[in-house]
Image (cartoon, coloured by chain):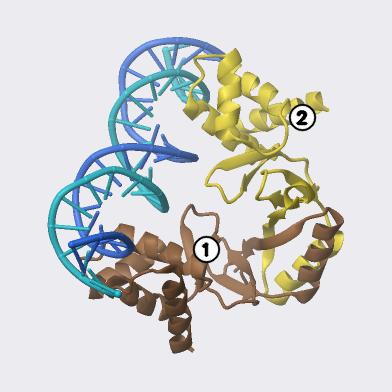
Chain colours: A brown, B yellow, C cyan, D blue
Amino acid sequence: MILEKKKAFNSFAAEKGLRSTRQRDIILDIFLSTHQHISVEELYLKIKSSNPGIGHATVYRTLKLFAESGLAREIHLHDGQTRYEHAMEGEHHDHLVCTGCDTIIEFEDETIEKLQREIASRHGFKINNHKMEIYGLCSDCRK
Amino acid sequence: MILEKKKAFNSFAAEKGLRSTRQRDIILDIFLSTHQHISVEELYLKIKSSNPGIGHATVYRTLKLFAESGLAREIHLHDGQTRYEHAMEGEHHDHLVCTGCDTIIEFEDETIEKLQREIASRHGFKINNHKMEIYGLCSDCRK
DNA sequence: CTTGCTGCAAACAGTTTGCAGAACT
DNA sequence: AGTTCTGCAAACTGTTTGCAGCAAG
C-alpha cells in the first residue's frame, strides 16, 4: 500500500516529465511513514535528522508536488501552519480539533456530505473541495 | 442596528475596563459599514484613506478586540489572510467559496449543524466553534 | 498624574524565490 | 550536453511586539 502510493507518484512524475531524485524519494518515504496532519516543519525536522543537508525549500516544493499528484492533501488548521495529510482518492474526512491538547480526530459523515452537495447545487456551484473543522474540547481536556 | 452594535461593544469595553479612543471609534464605524469578509489589509486601506495616520498595528489589535467582544468573527479562507465578518450572537453561517471569482456565498443549514453536534458528542467533544467551507466554481465561472 | 493606547519600526514565522552549482536523463 | 533540481540565503507576506510619546480617566 505504501508501495502502491510510490508507484502512483512515480507515474505522475513520469507523466509530468519530472526527474526522479534522491531527495524526492527520501521525502516520499518519510512522508508515507508519518501520521496524519504533519506540518511542513515537523516533516522537515524528521527528514533532517536522518538526512542532514536537505533544505527547507525542497521539502516545501516536494510537498506541493505530492499534493498536485493527489497523494497528499494540504490542510490549514487555525495555527498558521500548512499541514499535509495522506490522501487516497475519493475518500475524504473532516476534523474535530481539540483546542486544549491539539488532538485531531477524523470523522466522516455521508449525510453531511450529501447535504453539502445539495446546498452547492442549489446555488449552482460545482464542488471541487470542501473542508469542515469543529473546534472544541475533547473529553480529556474538559476535565 | 449599527447603533446597537456600537452599544454592545461599548458595554464590552466598559466591562473590560478598556478606554474609549478616537481610533477605536473610527475602526468600529468603518468595520460596521463594510461588507462581509473583509481582510485586515482591505480594512486598513479603507481606514487610511479617510484617516491617514492610523497604523497597521492598531487595526490588528482592534479587530482582535471586536472578535473578543463577539462583534466580529475571524475567518480564514485558503489565501493566507485573516478576514473578519460581522457576527451576531447565536447566528452562524458557512461559506461557499468560488475559486474562479472569489465570490463568497453564505448559507446556513440546521441539519448539518445538528449532525455536527451529534458527531461531537459521540466523541465526547464540547464544541466551541466550527467552520465549513465548500470550494468550487459558481454558476458564472462554470461558463 | 497614572495607566492604557497608539504609531512606528523592528522582529517574527511561515513560505517563496533567485541563483550558482550539482545531478538526472 | 542539456535541463531540471537542489541548497542556500535573501526576499516576501501577514502579523505581532517593544517602546517612547500621547491621551483618557
Q: Circle 2: is it few (<14), some (14-19), or many (20+) Cα within 10 Å?
A: some
Q: Is residue A104 above or below residue B7?
A: below
Residue for point 81% across, 51% down: B107
Q: Where's residue B43, x and y in %? A: 60, 28
Q: Is residue B78 above or below residue B84?
A: below
Can residue B46 be seen in this snapshot?
A: yes
How far apart marks 1 and 2 lie (CA) works out to 37 Å
Q: Is residue B23 above or below residue B62?
A: above
Q: Which mark is residue B5?
A: 2
Q: Circle 1: is it few (<14), some (14-19), or many (20+) Cα within 10 Å?
A: some
Q: Circle 1 marks a residue in which chain?
A: A
Q: Circle 2 marks a residue in which chain?
A: B
For residue B125, what is the image quadrant? bottom right
Task: Give the amino acid type for the residue marked by disc 2 in the picture.
Answer: Lys
Q: Is residue A109 left or right of residue A47?
A: right
* Residue closest to the eye, B138 or B31: B138
Q: Which mark is residue A62?
A: none
Q: Which mark is residue A74?
A: 1
Rendered-image quadrant of the C terminus of chain A: bottom right
Q: Where's residue B11, x and y in %? A: 71, 29
Residue for point 44% across, 84% down: A7
Q: Is residue A57 above or below residue B121?
A: above
* Residue closest to the eye, B38 or A100: B38
Q: Is residue A20 left or right of residue B16?
A: left
Task: Give the amino acid type for the residue marked by disc 1 in the picture.
Answer: Glu
Helix, strand or loop at mark 1: strand
Whether label 1 touches label 2, CB < 8 Å: no
Can residue A37 be seen in this snapshot?
A: no
